Amino acid sequence: MSFAAAAAELNVTPAALSYQIKALETDLGTPVFHRLNRAVELTEAGRALAPGVTDGFSAIAASWRNTQRLNDNSTLTITAGPAFTSKWLAPRLFDFAQAHPDIDLRFSASLRLIDFDRDEVDVAIRFGLGHDKDVFSAPLIREWMTPMMAPQLADQFNSPQALKDATLIHDDSISFFKTPTDWPAWCKAAGITFDTSHGVRFSQADHALDAAIAGAGVVLGRVSLATRALEQGRLVAPFNVGLVTDAQFRFICPQGHEARPNVKAFHDWVMSEIEASKPFENGRTFIDAKSLK
């Protein structure tokens, strides 16, 4: 609501801006501004015109930025959930930076739905059952869960049945699954029975893992988030039964962008890191949660 500020934004003189507005009003056949002493305000026609014009210019600006990004292979903006960012991505970023010093990574830890045009994001890593439409979507990690605990608890809870005396840590972040993948489901898969209703509950998976690492109890840990802690010996997973869920992490980007050099480099690096964690599957018996219904 300032002609002077608008002229500065457009890099034209106030006189030139005033001429353009008068031309617009002539074409429209009605004023869009009331000119006051030291201010302007929209007329009824101006108020009707402004929202659509604003949306139009915003769409043009977004298209311009997205087209510019196609030629920018030196930066990569990634969004992933807070738990995956803190437990999987962040501990490994130094390795990617060393392998790809020409790519600057930018992260947004968020679980909300992504609009690639609006959010100016190159890659989204999302967890769930996956119904991704009109985008490139590739599975990353087969998700399975098994009891995990700090090493100092392993002697005390040296069999599945011994867990009846443990403080159970519940990760409620996966409670939305149609097929339960919780403590009762794992006990059923392992062929044991005891009351699993006790313990502590967390709404975030990374908080549940942190509690287990601190020795607060035994968590039914998701391998996707716990791999680095297992590699470093901060957690152990002593039992061979793994409960598999349909939900998985997916690598998502706009259709066709998967071939962009920076996106492909990041995808290939993520896949190689996942492959390196496969040894934790050796010697385990995997039970599909759907088979327990």
Image (tube, grey):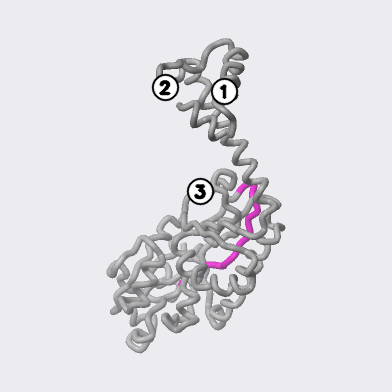
x and y percentages locating residue 83 in the rendered image: 44, 64
Circle 3 SS class: loop
Which badge, 2 or 3, comes first in the chain's sequence?
A: 2
Amino acid type at image mark 1: Ala
- 247 versus 274 height, above or below: above
Whole-number angstrom distance, CA of label 1 to CA of label 2: 16 Å
Which badge, 3 or 1, comes first in the chain's sequence?
A: 1
x and y percentages locating residue 17 in the rendered image: 57, 24
Whole-number angstrom distance, CA of label 2 to CA of label 3: 41 Å
Q: Residues within 10 Å of mark 3 (few under 14, many from 20)?
A: few
- Residue at the extreme top: 29
Circle 1 SS class: helix
Question: Label 2, on which residue?
Answer: 39
Q: Quadrant of residue 96?
A: bottom right
Question: In the depicted view, which residue is nearer to us: 131 or 241?
Answer: 131
Kindly identify the residue that appears in the image at 46 percent across and 55 percent down.
Answer: 110
Task: Name the chief secondary structure element in magenta.
Answer: strand
Question: Label 3, on which residue?
Answer: 113
x and y percentages locating residue 43 in the rendered image: 46, 16
Q: Which residues are magenta?
A: 133-145
Amino acid type at image mark 2: Ala
Kindly identify the residue that appears in the image at 49 percent across and 56 percent down.
Answer: 108
Q: Which mark is residue 15?
A: 1
Tag in front: 3 or 1: 1
Amino acid type at image mark 3: Leu
Kindly identify the residue that appears in the image at 57 percent across and 15 percent down.
Answer: 25
Q: Residues within 10 Å of mark 1 (few under 14, many from 20)?
A: few
